[in-house]
Amino acid sequence: MNRVEKNRIIFVFTCFCLFFLFVLGKAFKVQLIDAGDLIGRANSQFLRQATIYPKRGNIYDREGSALALNVQTYSIFTIPKATNGDKSVYKKLSKIIPEISYRETMNIITKRKRFTWIGRKLRLSKDQVEQVKELKGIFIEGVPERTYPNHELLAQTLGFVGLDNSGLAGLEHLYDKELRGNPVTLKYTIDNKGRPIKFESHQDMTAQAKDIYLTIDKDIQSMAEKYLKEAVIKHSADKGGVGVIDASTGEILAIANYPTFDPNDVKGSSPEHRKLAFATDPFEPGSAFKLFTVGSAFEHKVAKIDSNYYCEQGHMKVDGHIISEAESHERYEWLSVADIIKFSSNVGTTKIAFDLTFPKFKETLKTLNFGEKTGIEVPGESRGIFTEAENVTPLSLSNMSFGQGIAVTGVQMLAAYAAIANGGEYNRPTLIKKDQSHVAELEPENEHQLKKKMRVFSPKTSEDLTSALVGAVEKGTGTAAQIPHFKIAGKTATAQRVDRNGGYHGYVSGFIGFPVNVDRRFVIYVYVDNPKTGGYYGGAVAAPVFKNLAQYILYKNKDISKLADSEENANKDFDLKKIKNNIDIVQEKSAATRVYDPNSVPNLVGLDKISTTNIATKMNLHLIHKGMGVVSSQYPAPGTALSADLIIKLEYSPPNYE
């Protein structure tokens, strides 16, 4: 082999090696470096996907009654290529479902060649669904639509959802993640003409979205809205608000504003009517705020319930301004603190505040969560308006002492009064029932939200404040809130209404209170904004709403047992008529005047739960209580021989007072 041939072979071999290395490098690049990109390009040619959310979770009240749920609707989509250009398919579709316009459908599909929605949330019959399924290139998907079966009931709290079932307001928005669940991606394969040929299986969607149970009692909520609406209309007022809280737990049993809206028809409503102003819009609370001035004075040992203050015959000059009582004829001289609350004296409250001083007063108000969000589960909750200054002018302190120059929300007032009703312990107000692990708690913004429960008043202060409130209802400004056979603690409020220019125009009439002689206290707060007819004082406008709602809760077998006033029952007879089991009880003697045989079952008919419990303790009886009010029937019958293991079953019924 000569040199030329050898060089030629080397050259060819070298070229082959270089070519092989080039091919190897290219393969390496394709297989490893560009693999992801190439796979993506390939998938884009025959793989498609659509995002679908599971059925939205329901919202229930405390008893499991549905407040927000879903009804079955259908959404229709098309993949134009899958019809092979057959436009008659869309004509057939428009005949089956008249709501889908053929012309509009053609306009849509000319702009989009792939996955295209042509009908959303349609109410279809079973026959319509079956007919649509037979159309080539047309696909139908069952879609749950949000509905609110009670319409306006609790609307501002619940909120509403958008077209895609995402929460836009209220609890629907706040807990959208839990209610909506995680989206599922539906993947499908298409052929070379763009027609779906295979749908991949996907995970079960029904188990992802979560239901939420509220603290709301649907029946109490319904009556609260009814009585509030009646008051606003009766007094030609602009609006009003009402709230009910379980003092021992902080659970909100009812909360509403009027006017309201129907979340099934959001477009036809006003934005003002859609918000829960009871938690979002602060206002001057008026005389109901005096309790916190007095409570602060008690806590700081500045005054006692029987301390006396000279009330200047109804007029007192402060910083060149005259502080006067609500009525010119109210010319009080010496009043005890209890009477200052009973008669709602502005001058007396001012003098207490001056003895207290602003730093101490501010300390109490901050402890009661004024100037801070309570942490209730309401989007846009307001902190209210509260000065952060270390000191204020005497005039400002005077105004604040009786509820002017400070702005609060209905929720703040409700929670603060609940602390008084609960022996001085403050509970963070909540709309969500406990023991729902899937419901995320809101991020705490202050120590009240963090602790959930804390002591703000001593038991003695709470007791004295409650006593003063009882006096205000029995012999003071709140007599319209009295309920027969129940001791009511409460306070009226008639606050001047701040207008847009910073001045005062009209009034906000309010009443807040709670029954004392019950085994589980609840607080009701009612306010009516700018009443124009039928008076404007809180005692005339708001107190009757409180009375009607409290009577409903007390007499209608709600889960808040009633106890008759023990002092009253020890000294007088009952005149009860027609208990529900048709047993007539006429002038049933009280427990204090009955004589019992220690060896026989006593006659407990006509007695309240306090009395039966006291008798059971003295006689070592085993009782089972059912219902509330007074005993309407018992088993075994009175006179039956007692034994150690005998159980006496008592049924209670609300008495029919006349």
Image (cartoon, rainbow, N blue to C red):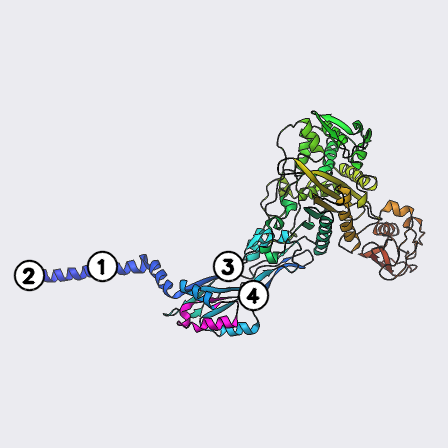
Is residue 301 at least partly visible in the picture?
Answer: no
Q: CA distance from mark 2 to mark 4?
A: 85 Å
Q: CA distance from mark 1 to mark 3?
A: 46 Å
State yes or no: discs 2 and 4 in contact (Cβ < 8 Å). Answer: no
Circle 1 or circle 3, nearest the eye:
3
Q: Quadrant of residue 606?
A: bottom right
Q: Residue at label 3? A: 183
State yes or no: discs 1 and 3 in contact (Cβ < 8 Å). Answer: no
The answer to which of marks 2 and 4 sits earlier in the sequence is: 2
Q: Residue at label 1? A: 22
Is residue 126 at least partly visible in the picture?
Answer: yes
User: Which percent across, then down, holds residue 214?
Assistant: 65, 54
Q: CA distance from mark 4 to mark 3?
A: 18 Å
Q: Residue at label 4? A: 73
Amino acid, disc 2: Val
The answer to which of marks 2 and 1 sits earlier in the sequence is: 2
Instruction: Tell me if residue 223 is in the magenta stretch.
Output: no
Tell me if 475 is positioned left or right of 359 in this view: right
Describe the element under mark 3 as helix, strand or loop: loop
From the viewer's side, name the closer residue of 552 and 561.
Answer: 552
Q: Residue at label 2? A: 4
Q: Residues within 10 Å of mark 2 (few under 14, many from 20)?
A: few
Q: CA distance from mark 2 to mark 3?
A: 73 Å
**Span colored in magenta:** 72-101
Q: Residues within 10 Å of mark 1 (few under 14, many from 20)?
A: few
Q: CA distance from mark 1 to mark 4?
A: 60 Å
Circle 1 or circle 4, nearest the eye:
4
Q: Quadrant of the N terminus?
A: bottom left
Amino acid, disc 4: Thr
Instruction: Tell me if residue 77 is in the magenta stretch.
Output: yes
The answer to which of marks 4 and 3 sits earlier in the sequence is: 4
